[in-house]
Image: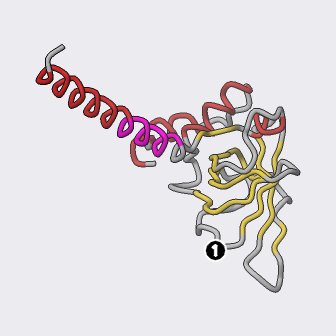
Amino acid sequence: MTPKRKKKLWILGLMLAGVSVTVGLTLFALSSNINLFFTPTQIQAGEAPENRQIRAGGMVVEGSVKRDPDSLRVRFAVTDSNAQVWINYDKILPDLFREGQGIVAVGELNADRELIASEVLAKHDENYMPPEVAEALEAAGKLPSGSQESSEATEATY
């Protein structure tokens, strides 16, 4: 092999290694930013990872909202009509948050399978339901009447 060919081969090898490292680091960065949606049934079945940011949603269980009188801390349960999961949140809740409303919470599961939320989303009117929640309730056969049309109509704005 001639010295000129060796030099070209080394340059090509270094370029290939540089591209490989760049692609690897990009994929690693993107994989840590993915927020997967889980229903309460999936969370209770152990399908959701602990100590990793996820999205969980369902209908807020009637009578489950417990507010701490000395702080903003709120604890409430959400259900998909098959199982329920408790959510702890320590910030101001959205104006549209209420019992019986479909919500999506972003946070991490602790060892007790409770979601420590960093964000709670409750949008649109009283008939709206987040698409993920509507799909989960529809799969369980527990979708409230009138919710599906509103969910489909406003899916693009959520």
User: What is the x, y in percent for residue 61?
Assistant: 80, 52
Tell me: 3 left or right of 111.
Answer: left
* Numbered range of the magenta stretch: 21-31
- In this orientation, which residue lies closer to the viewer: 32 or 149? 32
Please name whichever residue, 22 or 125, is drawn nearer the observer in this view of the structure: 22
Q: Which of 8/38 is in front? A: 8
- Among all residues in the image, which is located at the extreme front? 2
In the image, what residue type sits under mark 1?
A: Ile
Report which quarter residue 118 is drawn in.
Answer: bottom right
Return the x and y of residue 53 as percentages of the image width and height: 63, 50
- Return the residue found at the far bottom: 70
Residue pointed to by mark 1 = 92
Magenta-drawn stretch, dominant element (helix, strand or loop): helix
The reply, left or right, for residue 136 in relation to residue 31 is right
Query: At x 70% / y 53%, what residue is drawn?
Result: 108
Residue located 49% across and 41% down the image:
28
In the displayed structure, would residue 51 be above or below residue 68?
A: above
Which quarter of the figure has residue 23? top left
Residue farthest top in this picture: 1
Mark 1 lies on a secondary structure that is: loop
Q: Residue furthest left?
A: 4
Q: Is residue 141 above or below residue 37?
A: above
